[in-house]
Image (tube, grey):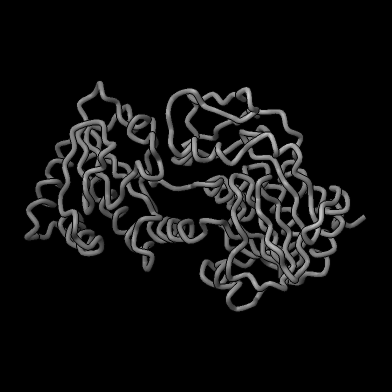
Amino acid sequence: MLCDDITLAPGEDQRLAAPSPACPRLEASLASYGPQDASSTPAIDGKSTDLPSALSRANAILSAARRPLFGALATDVTGARALYELAAHCGAILDHLHGDTLADSNRALQDRGAFFTTLSEVRSRADLVVVFACTPSQRYPRFYERAIDNERDVSIVFVGCDIDKAANTRAESIMPDADPFDTLARWSAHVEGGRPISVAELVALTERIVRAHYTAFIYEPATLPTKHAALAIEALQRIVKAVNRTARAGALALTGDDGAASVNQTITWLSGFPPRTRVTYRQPLDHDAHRYRTETLLRRGEIDALLWVASFAPEPLPASLADDVPAIILGHPSTDVPARTGPTVFIPVATPGIDSGGHLFRVDTSVVARLVAARDIALPTVASIASQLAQARRPQ
């Protein structure tokens, strides 16, 4: 959520801490950083080396590759821009760590459009909040604190799920065990087509929405049924659009973790396509949300090199990656690089907001947060590494 009221400070043991406000997710993340990060060095095939040697081997891997994949892409806006240029020189495919969720959200937006709202608008305007089939506080512990103003009269209705115990205002739950697709089908028929339905709870909720000053619909794409999640998002957005014929409402998708929103925005404005696109200077761009899914590419053995970018957390390489496929890891300094038969290059990189400044799109994708380094450890940024690799591939 990129909360802007948190200040990180090194303690006596050089570990980062956030005295207040409390956030369990932040605490868990900070536990992966420590004074040992300063001594993290690049490695080639498990043996420590210097940065120039690691860059040279990485460049050799990319030069030999004919169909590389740039995966995870957990970085900020500047990192995404630099990776895009490098990908264009390599003819690489781009996919994010949360590519499935991004693809579902993008497909619904492409097919039907959407009415989006923001955290600020929810806090300042909404008097009715509808949470659909999710528990926001599990992945976003400070959601209610940041989005709900307790000094205003706000009601929360949880549809298709139990009441989130972290909710800090008047709340109720309807149809907690109902199938989300059945619920959306009936609700859409009633709201869009004016058809009578036998679900009294949905009828009553629709009447409340019509009377409300402003209704915010909250959903979490990653918690929707894996198969056909895009259809669920599309149906929910259809309901929101139908409501806007006679009332005011907007939807807020809780997503975009690990730089997903930033990478999605950056790649789209640079290429015209979202992630899961193969980019090259020599041929037309090729976007395919199904074919260029990381797991699909790895399972079918369709790539000959992997550039894995994970600057926010020590994300392991995909389990489906063949052991002999060359891999380049631009990773969190505490990344545990496994022993592999294929060439493997590891370069520890800075985390935006921890080791370097940067910019990230917030969860509502309308605000770009400026990040400031919280500690002074000299780790290269993803952007600087990608730029150096791109420089080696530019025509002289």
Q: Quadrant of the C terminus?
A: bottom right
Q: Position of residue 175 (x, y in %)?
A: 16, 54
In the current view of this chain or complex, which residue is farthest to the front? 13
Residue at left offset 19%, top offset 34%: 155
Left or right, 48 with respect to 75, comes to right
Left or right, 164 with respect to 79, comes to left
Which residue is at the front of the view, 65 or 338? 338
Q: Is residue 366 visible?
A: no
Residue 11's quadrant in the figure? top right
Left or right, 267 with respect to 211, comes to right
Which residue is at the front of the view, 73 or 312? 312
Which residue is at the front of the view, 327 or 287? 327
Q: Position of residue 349 (x, y in %)?
A: 71, 44
In the rendered view, tell whether residue 118 sits above or below residue 235: above
Left or right, 279 with respect to 235, comes to right
Q: Position of residue 366 (x, y in %)?
A: 48, 38
Q: Is residue 311 visible?
A: yes
Residue at left offset 18%, top offset 33%: 170
